[in-house]
Image (cartoon, coloured by chain):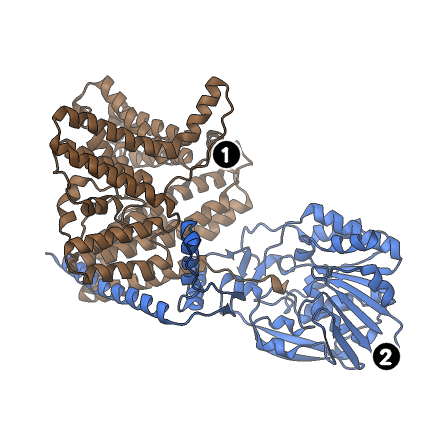
Amino acid sequence: MNKKEEYTKLFESFLSRFLVILLGFGMIINVMMPDHKESARENRSLQMFPSITWSSIVDGSFAKDVDEWFSDQLIGRDQFIYVRYLMQKFTGQTEINDIYLTSKGLIEKVKEPNTEELERNIKAINDLYTRTGVTTLFMLAPNSATVNKDKLPWFSEGLDQESMITEVFNSLEDGIIPIDVTTTLKKHKSEYLYYKSDHHWTSLAAFYALMEASSDLGLGGIKEENYNIYPVTTSFRGTLAQSVGSLGYSDQINIYVPKEEPDYLFINEGEGSKGPSVYSSKALEGSDKYSVFMGGNTSLCRLEMNNKSKKHLLVIKDSYANCLVPMLIPYYRTITVVDPRYYYEDIRRVINADSITEILYLYNGNTFFQDRSLADMIESSLK
Amino acid sequence: MAFNSLFFIFAFLPLALALYRYVPGQMVKNAILVLMGYIFYAWANPVNLLLIVLMTCINFVIVNDWENKSDQKVTVSFILTLILNVLVLGMYRYTNQFIDLINYFFELKIGSVELAFPFGLSFFTLSSISYMADVYRGKCYVQENLINYALYVSFFGKIGSGPIVQYADTEDALADHPMTKELMAKGSAKFIRGLVKKVLLADQLGLFVKALTGNTTMLGSWLMAIGFMLQLYFDFSGYSDMAIGIGNMFGFDWKENFDHPYTATSIREFWRKWHISLYEWFKDYIYIPLGGSRIKASLYIQVVLLIFVLSGIWHGSNLTFLVWGVYFGILVIFERYFFHKILDKSKKFSHFYTLLLVLFGWVFFMSKDMNAALETFSYMFGMGKGIADLSSLFALRTYIVILLLSILFCTNFYAKLETLIIKKYKNKSILVNLLLYLLLFVVSVACIVGSTYNPFLYFAF
């Protein structure tokens, strides 16, 4: 036997011992350890050991559930997912699950518009404006992939979201005021406008957008000095990091509290709660830290301010609005916030009941271009 | 169940190893392996197990009866049993094609039937035929022990995707295949190598191919075909390595099923290096019984074409598989009578020629129908949307490392690397290799876990 064979045999012999220990240990520990019902990291319930029935064995569902149970409950699952992410990163992959890995952090790809739904949504917005005559503004925020186009990996084929936004604005009724924040955000693109680990814009980006919108909203000059900026967490690990399986990114969330903030009541009708603050400190303890703003997404919530304003705002929105709405508190008597994805009631009744004087649509491109709920909500109220 | 599932790696395999190691007596050990094989087989679709058990019993009883029959009756019985086995396979694979033909010729409107193809039936059938033929030709004795026979056709290490171990090669081992340290060691390394090929290369290449599916540029279609060519090799050879490694762990020592096929310098050599157990099966049970290489040219051509047609329809029921078989049959014949002199002149040219023609062959193999195959060819030759687009360049950029690694590992680079490590580190190479394999095992498991990673993110949008 030559040296090579000798060493190979010795190595294989050690390897087999390690493998047997690994497999045996893996089997015992995975069977012995108690099962977990939920995964905080994946934000879903985990498969428990399935009950054995004759029909589940025959139709193969028992085996499928056992496979799922084993993989869901595997010891070190989160660490394995991170190792996989590192492997993908080190082999040069710059896109995982439609998310780009860039020097600006994780950036979500621009999503294809759902043309049919988009047309319906625009028509519904126009119809509601025509029927109610309420002053209407439309802010359509670009996503990071549009603002940070130059940071995307070479050859990444991005859709032109800027043109898509312009096209939407051009399709709106003449009276509806489009608020273009893309140019403003592009001017500040070197700043911290989007979270590195999440698909949302930061409070800073929302603030720049508000500055851009302030004259259209009739708010006068809005300045940074009007707000106290508080960092509430530095360990925000958002949806994009969760989706690619990275543990390395963490973000800071700042809240912009108006210096001259009136007393107000925050009524979350979706959750059935009310309180003196629009911020949810409880959310900072969980995995979805962006829910610090208004407690996350809910069907309808109201802010009732103790001030003398005569303006009553209705915000029809997605989650991008959650960090911007608190900045508006000093300027309105009431703000009603509706998320059409969870709201199924008559929106015209809300407009009348809350004496709405202005309607602000606030969406980010990726959500708006694929939205399937806005038209349903408006159309049902116009029947 | 698949070898690259977490349940198999961390539950089924260690349990089977422990049972096999600690239960007394070879017969009980074999019975355990048969039982485990049936659980493995029935995992996703238990109903199909009935077919496997039934066919095992039928074949076993019929062949056992040959001892009491005259040669003539044995021949008749052999032919009928052969037809029965082929019919069962054909029924699952070609019933709908047969119905289509009847509808076409007799202008009928018989509806198609839903018959899910039983996992591993192709391999099971070839193993069954191997047993019958080896006994019929007197190469082996009749297997009198049902458990041993059931183990031969249903061992979980090979029932799903081979290798197609010939009965004569494993007859002795069936009765006595102790778990030895040497085979365990060899099998462990082989299993990990197979897992790495399957999970770290083939599955990643699968994503590359998926990213290019539908791309009609020249670059995109070439990359997709090359990606598929590499994916298929690492997928199948990886799975075969895992199967051979598992066989080693349980005391079997089977031959290699792949031998760096993409280093071949002719199509004939390619087929001696690709899916070797299938090549050997066709050689031993069809080619040689029909006369082998000593027959005259016209008969040789017919035999070669027959083998490749059979190989094509064994792989699948689409017309593309038949065309794929005929394509390689014609190439083998042309090489024997015309090309061999040209190919002998330059190794580099012949290697390039082989890779190119094999690549074209895989285009038929990967396409869902002939139209799709012809479309891919048209894109490859510039009749699509230009030379390249951003998505093909992006896919290339994203997967370039995986592609280069795959190309390297198609050659005997790994063997050279191993020699280099041993030369450089001498006895420390044991530790270096050990760490490398364990690291690759962990990363492979991580990739399997990652493929089941499914965070619920809608709440945040």
* A383 with respect to B158 (left or right): right
Q: Residues within 10 Å of mark 2 (few under 14, many from 20)?
A: some
* B132 with respect to A240 (left or right): left
The disc at residue A126 is none
Q: Can the viewer see residue A105? A: no
Q: Which residue is mark 1?
A: B379
Q: Quadrant of residue A289?
A: bottom right
Above-or-below relation of B11 to B376: below
- Residue in the picture at 77% in, 51% down: A122
- Residue in the picture at 35% in, 35% down: B315
Residue B187 at x, y = what percent? Answer: 22, 55
For chain B, what colour was chosen? brown
Residue A145 at x, y = what percent? Answer: 62, 58
Q: Which amino acid, by three-letter code, is at mark 1?
A: Tyr
Q: Can the viewer see residue B450? A: yes
Q: Chain of mark 1?
A: B
Q: Which residue is mark 2?
A: A307
- Chain in blue, by letter, is A
Q: Nearer the viewer, residue A223 or B165?
A: B165
- Disc 1, disc 2: CB below 8 Å? no
Q: Which amino acid, by three-letter code, is at mark 2?
A: Asn
